[in-house]
Image (spheres, coloured by chain):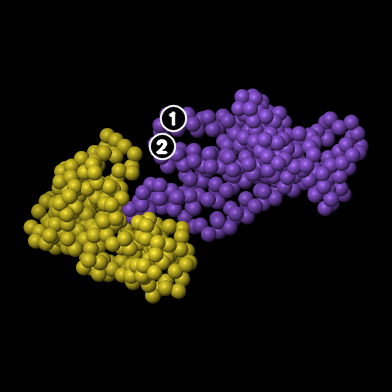
Amino acid sequence: MVKSKIKLQTKKLNVWYGNMHVVKDFTLKIPEKKITAVIGPSGCGKSTFLRSLNRMVELVPGARVSGEILLDGENIYDKDVDETEIRLRIGMVFQKPNPFPKSIYENVAYGLKVRGITEEKKLRLLVEESLKKVGLWEEVRDRLNRSALELSGGQQQRLCIARALAVKPEVILMDEPCSSLDPIATAKIEDLLFELKKDYTIVIVTHNLQQAARVSDYTAFMYAGKLIEHGRTEEIFERPKNKITQDYITGRFG
Amino acid sequence: MVKAKTCERLGFWSTRVAILISLSITGYMLFYIISKGASIISWDFLTKPPTSGMTAGGIFPAIVGTLLLVTLAIVISLPLGLASAIYLVEYSSKESRFVRLVELAVYSLNGVPSIVFGLFGMAFFVKFLGFGTSLLSASLTLSLMILPTIVATSVEALKSVPDHFREASLALGATKGQTIVRVVLPAAFPGIITGAMLGVGRAAGETAPILFTGAVFYMRGLPTSIFDPVMALPFHLFVLATEHPNISKVEPIQYGTALVLLILVLLISLIATVIRYRYRRKRKW
């Protein structure tokens, strides 16, 4: 089904919160430099699935994970794997824009400084490069030292993407990145996604079916913790094989 | 309908009267202390030691003593309290029995009368550890007394930092420690400082904890080491008001001391308010 190289894949992935079985036997291949959308009704485990891909799920008290997640063939849940290394290679953008209460510059430089990069020239260069990639450079170049919280919601979200790009990840996870944005800001982010997939593998969780249809190459439909159907986006939207997928896509439930 | 409106008016007026009463009592107290103490305040009063059996001269050693006591107390209790708060909020699971026990202990400690801290300080620091009646013993006792305040306010300050800041930092490959130092603490800073200032204000005004542990009525010169005893404003006031034979002569000094103490504590709360206000304007989460 999938021709391009597989960047990330889950094998029999299960996630529990205490006694709640949230993600069930999830096996999915995520191709490199493509956009994979994960769709499904609220509470079906989409966000939990996404958060298991960079081990953020482990931060929830009582969370348990079984199965494998292979990044370039290597299980990120292996005992000797450092989760901070994984999060460097697999970046994340959240539902609500969440810049730090610091300057625009400090926000983008954060991940680099944490990595021990302190050379001012290098930092400046990488910050500029990241802001250019998200199309924010022209808008903020004169006020890099102003608080990031002064930016509009859409600008904040692009800043958060720039912040994630600065540490040069290979995969970017996006958890409903446009759900709190207006249509114009949403369109900008969607345009940005097309640019980004030239260099990055993107997994996006979305509530918005039109968005999934517009931006993604592959779509995975999730229902009650299970992967129901997965394939090329056109196929999922035009010729879904499964009855539940069809009902969801046609808006019979949501 | 008329009845409900009358009730409403009555309720409104009773709250108004309540506020008037508390305001006027505070106002009268301030007026009383200022009117009795203001005349004696002078440069000499603030910078000279007492003379002629405490009936003349200034209160300089007591001012310095109080500043030393509170500085040392906060230097001891802030790191201790903040570290405990960080452990409670960031590292322990919220429902664990241990955390509940610590929280219970902190709240109970907050309710312990200050004289009990004074007695404990005398038994433990002065006698058992052999620090004697000294600046060190008194500061340690004060730091114990304000520790619960520091822990409780720091816990609140850390809890008020939204989790999405922590998530953003961790998702960028930061460790938990880096996240706390670089994101959580700066965001919690105004709350932590407010708590520290509250503690300092309380430590500056208390007499009981230093009564048996380090305060003396009179000493020649200033303390030269942490093992020397100190003079302190609240203790000075206490002794002048209760033990001095020549009441009429020391009365102005007594009110002057009260006024200086009051201004000192007000100044500390003012600093805390300014810091909090400046930070609050900047934050928008």
Quadrant in the picture for the N terminus of chain A: bottom left
Between B179 and B100, which is closer to the camera in this rendering?
B179
Between B166 and A212, which is closer to the camera in this rendering?
B166
Pinpoint residue B135: horizontal percent, then vertical percent: 68, 37
Say which chain tag 2 marks: B
Residue visible at 33% across and 44% down in the picture:
A59
Reading the chain from its start, which is encountered first: label 1 or label 2?
A: 2
Pinpoint residue A39: horizontal percent, then vertical percent: 22, 54
Labelled disc at residue B92:
2
Q: Is residue B51 visible?
A: yes
Q: Amino acid at mark 1?
A: Phe
Q: Where, by quadrant of the figure, is residue B223 drawn? A: top right
Residue visible at 17% across and 54% down in the picture:
A72
Q: Check contact, mark 1 vs mark 2: CB within 8 A.
A: yes
**Relative to B162, A189 lies left or right:** left
Pinpoint residue A167: horizontal percent, then vertical percent: 31, 60
Residue visible at 28% across and 68% down in the picture:
A192
Chain drawn in yellow: A
Query: SS at mark 1?
Result: helix
Report how far apart the C-alphas of labels 1 and 2 lie in the structure.
9 Å
**Image vertical order of residue B227 relative to residue A176, above or below:** above
Pinpoint residue A60: horizontal percent, then vertical percent: 33, 42
Packing grade of label 2 (10 A; few <14, some 14-19, many >=20) is few
Query: SS at mark 2?
Result: loop
Labelled disc at residue A194:
none
Chain drawn in purple: B
**Image vertical order of residue A170 relative to residue B184, above or below:** below
Labelled disc at residue B98:
1
Say which chain tag 1 marks: B
